[in-house]
Amino acid sequence: MAVNPNKIRYGLKNVHYAKLTEAVSDTYAEPSAIAGAVNLSLTPVGESTSFIADDMEYYIAQGNNGYEGTLEIAILPEDFRKTIMGEVEDTKKVLFEKASANPEPFALLFEFTGDAHQIKHVLYKCIVTRANIEGAATISKEVKTVTLNIQVLPNKAGYVKANTKSDTDATVSGNWYTTVQTFVGT
């Protein structure tokens, strides 16, 4: 019997990304940490359609087109900029943003601090846009963060997200940030 679910959620931590290396088989590279997670805010995308018959809503269909929203972090890691954003480094160790670069899809893994059961999450096919560049001359130490617009789409198998539960196998939960968990079943 499963333990009661959590009652509250706060704090974002253990944010990792894993590049989608093979879309046909939903294969991902090893996850890499993104330090300095501040906020993740996602809204469902999809339509609801109903068919009226017999003087009532005879059929209702919900479309699941994933999520869209923002991921706010302290600073965008160089490896993320190269691996996901397509920036290139020259022989003098200068990082260049190419106008023709298209962001690569990736999985986003994370958990919440207020989670009594340490439930871990994965969003399977994430696409981000370039981040704003901000800064200000100031005497105070006001911190500026990086906000990425993120779109979460279904993967090839049709899954948008997954999460562990209070009764998930301890090995799966313990290895969550070493490999991207994909559906296993009949």
Image (cartoon, rainbow, N blue to C red):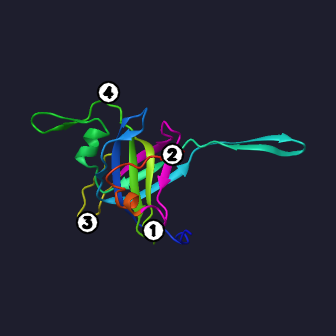
Name the residue that disc number 4 marks.
100
- Check disc 1 and report the residue beneath it: 10
Tell us which disc is closer to us: 1 or 3. 1
Give the mark, 1 or 3, whose residue is nearer the N terminus.
1
Callout 3 amino acid: Ser
Q: Earlier in the sequence, mark 2 or mark 3?
A: 3
Q: Mark 2 falls on what kind of element?
A: loop
> Which label belongs to residue 160?
2
Answer with mark 3 or mark 4, whichever residue precedes in sequence: 4
- The residue type indicated by label 4 comes to Ser
Three-letter amino acid code at disc 2? Val
Closer to the eye: label 3 or 4: 4
Give the label, 2 or 3, closer to the camera. Answer: 2
- Is residue 3 shown above or below 12? below
Q: Which residues are magenta?
A: 147-169
- Whether 139 is drawn above or below 122: the answer is below
Amino acid type shown at disc 1: Tyr
Q: Is residue 131 visible?
A: no
Tell me where residue 94 appears, x and y as whole percent. Answer: 15, 38
- Neighbor class of circle 4 (other Cα within 10 Å; few <14, some 14-19, many 20+) is few
